[in-house]
Image (spheres, rainbow, N blue to C red):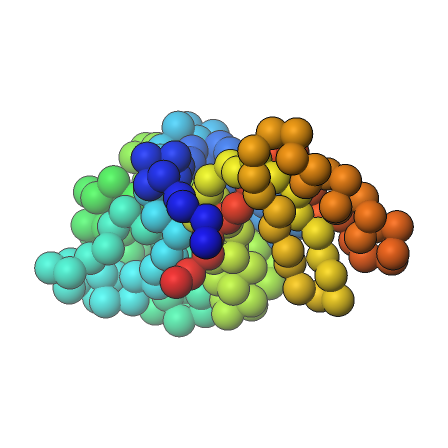
Amino acid sequence: MIKIDQKAISKKEYISVDFFYRATKDTFKLKLLSDRSGFENKIFEQNMHRPGLALAGFVDLFSYSRVKVFGNTEMQYLAQLSDDKKKQTLERLFKFEIPCIIITDKNQSFPILLELANKHHIAILGSQYPTTKTIYLLSDFLDDQFASRISIHGSFVDVYGVGILFVGKSGIGKSEVALDLVERGHRLVADDVIILTKKGE
């Protein structure tokens, strides 16, 4: 049984929208639709949010600190509003400190949406993927970013698909045991410094 010092466990408090965009734009084909004024905003959690109720006017339980996702439903709702109503709806939303907005499924942004986003320093990103796939891919990325991590001194080997971690005092022979297993056809995952990441429970 490995004793874990809880103080040694680290977890990111936030990531910037700039980092989020740079890390995901190529892999997940995100495009910047607004200016870069919202890139200093901070993302504090891995969960994403579709603001359908907030657009309709109910903001009492609005999870404003999460990355917002505008899918077909949100974009079609905005499209059927008059210009004045659209502006009023978006102004109500942008009063909150939203990290950024992702428009999915190749939907085109509205000029008023980009104008208000730039005014309130909220980055608008576009994705060609459907909403469900976008949320799945980006949630997995955010899970990685906000997962708890700890570094342990040891050797880690994959033996028949099972991870085996060798720990102990320095010079006890952890690396030699790992090397012996590698010579028998097993796979070395890491040696000396092992970084363990906890995703989910």
The answer to whether residue 38 shows anywhere in this view is no
Place of residue 14 in the rendered image (x, y in percent of width and height, measured from the top left): 37, 37
Which quarter of the figure is the N terminus placed in?
bottom left
Place of residue 23 in the rendered image (x, y in percent of width and height, measured from the top left): 59, 39
Q: Residue at x 50, y 48 (%)?
A: 197
Query: From the viewer's perspective, is 106 left or right of 12?
Result: right
Nearer to us in this view, 21 or 109: 21
Farthest front residue in view: 172
Which quarter of the figure is the C terminus placed in?
bottom left
Q: Residue at x 42, y 61 (%)?
A: 200
Q: How many marks?
A: 0
Q: Residue at x 27, y 47 (%)?
A: 65
Place of residue 19 in the rendered image (x, y in percent of width and height, measured from the top left): 51, 34
Place of residue 80 in the rendered image (x, y in percent of width and height, measured from the top left): 34, 68
Q: Residue at x 66, y 64 (%)?
A: 162
Query: From the viewer's perspective, is 101 left or right of 89?
Result: right
Query: From the viewer's perspective, is 188 left or right of 74?
Result: right
The answer to whether residue 147 shows anywhere in this view is yes
Nearer to us in this view, 66 or 145: 145
